[in-house]
Image (cartoon, rainbow, N blue to C red):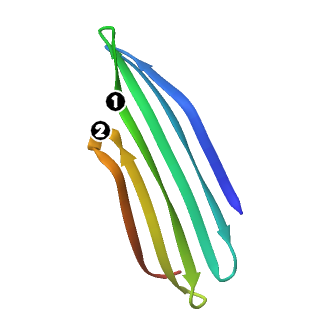
């Protein structure tokens, strides 16, 4: 199992003051026959302009992917992705997919 987590604040100053915080990570497990990934990212951001503070970004994304080796070079893949974005009016976007691959 391999994984990584990242998070942290950010900020900028100019004509406005921006502040944001991101949080995310992924995990991956692999055997000789299959691989599975799990991933997650989130961001929340705001800006202060003329003494008025307002949100500029609020999004959460994540998903899972599974690959199954059919032979030494050929594999079948499937995934599910989920997304929420306040400013795009995405309450919950769900994407499912799959395919075939060839490992060079």
The residue labelled by disc 1 is 56
**Looking at the picture, how far across and down is residue 33, in whole percent?**
65, 83
Label 2 near label 1: C-beta < 8 Å? yes
Name which residue lies at 62% across and 78% down.
34
**Looking at the picture, how far across and down is residue 1, in whole percent?**
71, 63
Name which residue lies at 35% across and 56% down.
93
Q: Is residue 59 left or right of residue 41?
A: left
Q: Is residue 91 left or right of residue 71?
A: left
Which residue appears farthest toward the bottom when viewing the image? 71
Circle 2 residues within 10 Å: few <14, some 14–19, many ≥20: few
Which structural element holds mark 2? Answer: helix
Circle 1 residues within 10 Å: few <14, some 14–19, many ≥20: some
Q: Is residue 33 left or right of residue 94?
A: right
The residue labelled by disc 2 is 87
Mark 1 / mark 2, whichever is N-terminal: 1
Residue 53's image quarter?
A: top left
């Amino acid at each position: 199992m391999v994984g990584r987590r990242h998070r942290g604040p950010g900020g900028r100053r100019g004509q406005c003051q921006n502040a944001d915080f991101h949080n995310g990570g992924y995990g991956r497990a692999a055997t000789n026959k299959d691989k599975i990934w799990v991933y997650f990212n989130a961001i929340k951001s705001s800006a202060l302009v003329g003494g008025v503070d307002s949100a500029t970004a609020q999004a959460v994304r994540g998903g899972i992917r599974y690959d199954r080796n059919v032979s030494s070079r050929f594999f079948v893949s499937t995934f599910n992705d989920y997304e929420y974005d306040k400013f795009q009016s995405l309450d919950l976007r769900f994407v499912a997919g799959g395919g075939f691959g060839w490992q060079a």
